[in-house]
Amino acid sequence: MALRPNPTLRQRRIGTELRRMREQAGLGGSQLARKLGIQPAQITQMESGKGGISAERLRTIATACMCDNQPLIDALADMTSERGKGWWEEYRNLLTIDFLEVAELEGHAERITFCNTVYIPGLLQTRAYASAVFARLIPPLPPQDIETRTTFRLKRQEVVRSGAKPLRVFIHEAALRMQFGGPVVLIDQLAALLDDSEQPGISVRVVPFAIDTFPGAGENLIYVEGPVPELDTVEMDVSQGALFFDSPTNLAKHRTIFSSLDATALTEGESRDFIRSIMKEVKSAYA
């Protein structure tokens, strides 16, 4: 079987979990290869995601590594059986890999949770707001690139607007007040956010300035739940692109962050009232 030159995020994740199984069993790559009767290079290829793996082979590896986490094994076996390409592959030569991998992550999610401190979460942005977010980048993007990124972002929204995937959103007050595109765009965005907050499966909660503690370091975060907790993933937005975290330590840390947000944020009803109050302020200031 030919090696994959550019394995997808999910293919790399299968390899990461295989490596974790092997390491937890205290086995080196060569030791596991001897147990399986294959070359050590094949272990490296599978763990990097470049080498394909069948569900049967994955279960054999799990047995060799004495892994008894059956839900995790079953979930990984299901992942090895996936065929076909996601809609995001249409953009592979138009956008950087970060965009595609975020969409891939969301496309396979069981539930998605956002924590945003600078801007409205991408899955709830209006076209005008999303375009303004991309237009403020330095160096400036060509108009066609802004349009492509904006269209891609709106396409991503289908995963939650269809009602198939629950969405939780924690938005800091600062993000509600940032005027990407100016006051008119912000007012329309806040109105759309209120409408979305009433939709089944979408929860929007605000963290106001008045809260005396904000958990975490303040980055814009996405927590994506997999079919089992071990396959959850955290995505962090940074100026250089997207960073992905899936180690047990990082997952535990961010579960604590979101648990703290859940305990301190306004209720859904209070959040809607808060968003309306900001809309009123903006309308009064720029009438």
Image (spheres, rainbow, N blue to C red):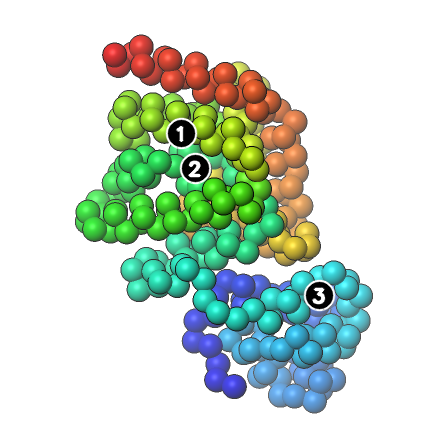
Q: Is residue 109 visible?
A: yes
Mark 2: secondary structure: helix
Q: Which residue in the structure is indicated by mark 2? A: 124
| Residue at 47%, 35% in the rendered image | 116
Which quadrant of the figure contains the C terminus? top left
Mark 1: secondary structure: helix
The answer to whether the residue labelled 2 contacts the one labelled 1, judged by CB atoms less than 8 Å apart, is: yes
Mark 3: secondary structure: helix
Task: Tell me which numbered mark, 1 or 3, is placed earlier along the sequence.
Answer: 3
Q: Which residue in the structure is indicated by mark 3? A: 74
Amino acid at pointer 2? Leu
Local crowd size for mark 3, using a 10 Å CA cut-off: few (<14), some (14–19), many (≥20): some
Task: Tell me which numbered mark, 3 or 2, is placed earlier along the sequence.
Answer: 3
Determine which quarter of the picture holds residue 227: bottom right
Which of these two is toward me, 272 or 53? 272
Question: Of discs 1 and 3, which sits in the foreground?
Answer: 1
Q: Where is residue 202 in the image (x, y as percent from the top left)?
A: 54, 35
Task: Tell me which numbered mark, 2 or 1, is placed earlier along the sequence.
Answer: 2
| Residue at 31%, 39% in the rendered image | 127
| Residue at 32%, 57% in the rendered image | 95
How far is disc 2 from disc 1 in space, using C-alphas?
Answer: 8 Å
Q: Is residue 27 visible?
A: no
Q: Where is residue 7 in the image (x, y as percent from the top left)?
A: 47, 70
In the rendered view, tell whether residue 37 sits above or below residue 53. below
| Residue at 69%, 78% in the rendered image | 56
Q: Where is residue 232 in the image (x, y as percent from the top left)?
A: 62, 52
The answer to whether the residue labelled 1 contacts the one labelled 3, judged by CB atoms less than 8 Å apart, is: no
The circle on residue 119 is none
Q: Which residue in the structure is indicated by mark 1? A: 192
